[in-house]
Amino acid sequence: MTPFEVANGLDLPPDYLNTFMADLQEELTKLDWFSQILRPGEKAAPENLPTLKLTGVITHFRKGSIAAALGGIMAGAAGKTDLDAQVTLSDGASGEKFTEEVLYAQVPRATIGGKSTHPTVVLAKQITKLIKKKGQNLSPPSTSPAAQPSPAAPPTAP
């Protein structure tokens, strides 16, 4: 799993990217599909296992307004925090893309009498939903059916 990139000119606080990568690691682990989740610098999985490469670019960030969220000062989504990313799932060995999608995380900045989910958690959960949705089709067309990843024989995620 490589750290996501941040689009040029995007004013994303450094802690957001670190928090997002930790949240993504946690959500991928919860998914329980991968025998290994590799971070940069870690040893690659054995060659006989299929690998899934997850890459992405944070494309949009807007910090919501607490005043708007709590006081209703502005209409619409002013109180919400937005965090969007272009996510690519590809074969770890060949680099062939399985899918590329833009995912959107929009959550309230704060709520009265409750807690708001951090947008990094929402985005990480959307990525695991994408993996589950595309799971049975995460094999390049040139790969034999025996090599296709399945919940019984999950790929590793570099």
Image (cartoon, rainbow, N blue to C red):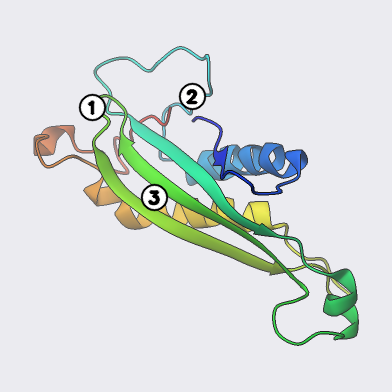
The numbered disc on residue 2 is none
Left or right, 65 with respect to 148, comes to right
| Total numbered labels placed on residues in the image | 3
From mark 1 to mark 2, how far is it between C-alphas?
A: 17 Å
Q: Is residue 127 above or below residue 114?
A: above
Per the image, label 1 sits on a secondary structure element best described as loop
N-terminal label among 1 and 2: 2
Name the residue rendered at 27%, 15% in the picture. Answer: 47
Q: Residues within 10 Å of mark 1 (few under 14, many from 20)?
A: few
**Between 114 and 100, the one nearer to me in the picture:** 100
Marks 3/2: CA–CA distance: 16 Å
Residue 31 rendering spot, x and y as whole percentages: 48, 45
Nearest to viewer (mark 1 / mark 2):
1
Residue 131 marker: 3
Q: Which residue is labeled 2 in the image? A: 38
Where is residue 23 drawn, in percent x and y? Answer: 64, 43
Q: What element does badge 2 sit on?
A: loop
**Measuring 41% from the left and 40% from the top, which residue is drawn there?**
33
Q: Which mark is residue 94?
A: 1
Amino acid at the residue labelled 3: Ile
Q: Is residue 72 above or below residue 62?
A: below
Whichever of labels 3 and 2 marks the residue nearer the N terminus, that label is: 2
The residue type indicated by label 2 comes to Leu
Where residue 106 appears, x then y in whole percent? 64, 67
Q: Secondary structure at mark 3?
A: helix
Callouts 3 and 2 close, C-beta under 8 Å: no
The quarter of the displayed image where residue 105 is located: bottom right
Q: How many C-alpha atoms fall within 10 Å of the one at disc 3: few (<14), some, or many (≥20)?
A: many
Query: Disc 1 or disc 3, which is closer to the eye?
Result: 1
**Disc 1 residue type?**
Ser
